[in-house]
């Protein structure tokens, strides 16, 4: 699979976000839907990806740090450059993304001031370093992990990577990563008989991380060290096999922290992106 996006292409991207919290205090589910445009332009020997025309369709019911962050992340999709091989190079317009989120937050919180923790979370996610890290990670799951290699259908390949776990405050965790080209699937109704590939990435904490994670959870959540702490990070991408142009992406993170007395805290975040491309049609997979 080799990266090959054409300059001049563009897509309408629909982002669906869900934040679920389950604890002894109750069960809460917050949802948001945001759309924006992705434009692909030639720049040097690579491409520049431009994210604009952001529009909010639905917003969460609660304004807590997590729900504010999930809206800010979508509104704050920042332009960046990739090289001809599909590797992330650098941000190109972080100030535009920061201004877009700041404008939204000013309007949204003009009449109801959220907690200081919300302002702190916004400051964290809007720093240039945080945006660069987030966009590089996003591009990795969408294209970067997959480009430049061969995957045998149904076979699982293992690697290790450092992944930040949002449900634990964004701490970096060394993960065992398993990637699989799962099966052939239709690219979508609007693409007639074009065939895409379904790619799966599953990340779980490396064995040597488990005691450290238990120590962290015990200190901050009074967790029960005798029971298993569950951390799951999954990505599913439906993409064209020749060129790696995506049609959908699902990111899901689940953190379950055991408490004394058999109860638990469950923190789950899900992000679904649907890409509706308007330029060229998908390419058929090469058979050789």
Image (cartoon, rainbow, N blue to C red):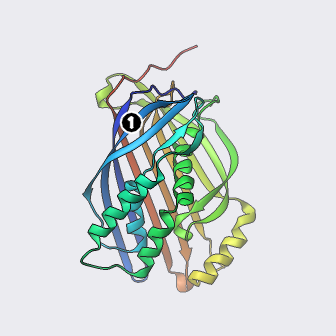
Q: Does residue 15 sit above or below 116 in this rendering?
A: above
- Quarter containing the C terminus: top right
The x, y position of residue 143, in whole percent, is 54, 38
Identify the residue shown where x is 50% and y is 43%. 80
Q: Is residue 145 left or right of residue 13?
A: right
The x, y position of residue 86, in whole percent, is 57, 34
Image quarter for residue 179?
top right
Identify the residue at the far right of this view.
Answer: 208
Image quarter for residue 269?
bottom left
The x, y position of residue 242, in whole percent, is 51, 24
Q: Does residue 220 sit above or below 136 in this rendering?
A: below
Between 123 and 222, the one nearer to me in the picture: 123
Between 211 and 132, the one nearer to me in the picture: 132
Q: Secondary structure at mark 1?
A: strand
The x, y position of residue 83, in whole percent, is 58, 33
| Residue identifier under label 1 | 39
Identify the residue shown where x is 53% and y is 39%. 81
């Amino acid at each position: 699979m080799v990266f090959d996006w054409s300059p001049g292409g563009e897509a309408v991207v629909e982002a669906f976000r869900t934040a679920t919290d389950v604890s002894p205090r109750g069960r809460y589910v917050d949802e948001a839907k945001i759309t924006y445009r992705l434009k692909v332009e030639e720049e040097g020997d690579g491409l520049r990806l431009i994210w604009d025309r952001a529009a909010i369709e639905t917003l969460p019911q609660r304004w807590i740090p997590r729900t504010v962050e999930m809206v800010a992340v979508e509104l704050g999709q920042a332009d960046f450059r990739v090289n001809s091989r599909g590797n992330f190079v650098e941000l190109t317009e972080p100030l535009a993304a920061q201004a877009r989120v700041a404008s939204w937050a000013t309007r949204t919180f003009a009449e109801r001031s959220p907690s200081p923790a919300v302002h702190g979370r916004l400051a964290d996610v809007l720093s240039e370093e945080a945006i660069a890290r987030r966009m590089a990670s996003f591009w990795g799951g969408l294209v970067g992990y997959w480009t430049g290699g061969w995957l045998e259908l149904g076979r699982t390949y293992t690697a290790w990577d450092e992944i930040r776990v949002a449900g634990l405050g964004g701490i970096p965790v060394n993960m065992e990563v398993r990637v699989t080209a799962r099966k052939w699937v239709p690219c979508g109704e609007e693409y007639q008989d074009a065939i895409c590939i379904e790619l799966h990435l599953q990340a779980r904490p490396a064995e040597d991380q488990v005691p450290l994670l238990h120590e962290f959870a015990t200190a901050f959540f009074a967790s029960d060290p005798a029971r298993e702490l569950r951390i799951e990070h999954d990505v599913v991408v439906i993409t064209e096999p020749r060129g790696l142009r995506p049609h959908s992406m699902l990111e899901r993170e689940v953190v379950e922290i055991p408490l004394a007395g058999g109860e638990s805290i469950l923190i789950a975040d899900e992000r679904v992106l649907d890409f509706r491309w308007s330029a060229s049609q998908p390419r058929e997979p090469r058979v050789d």
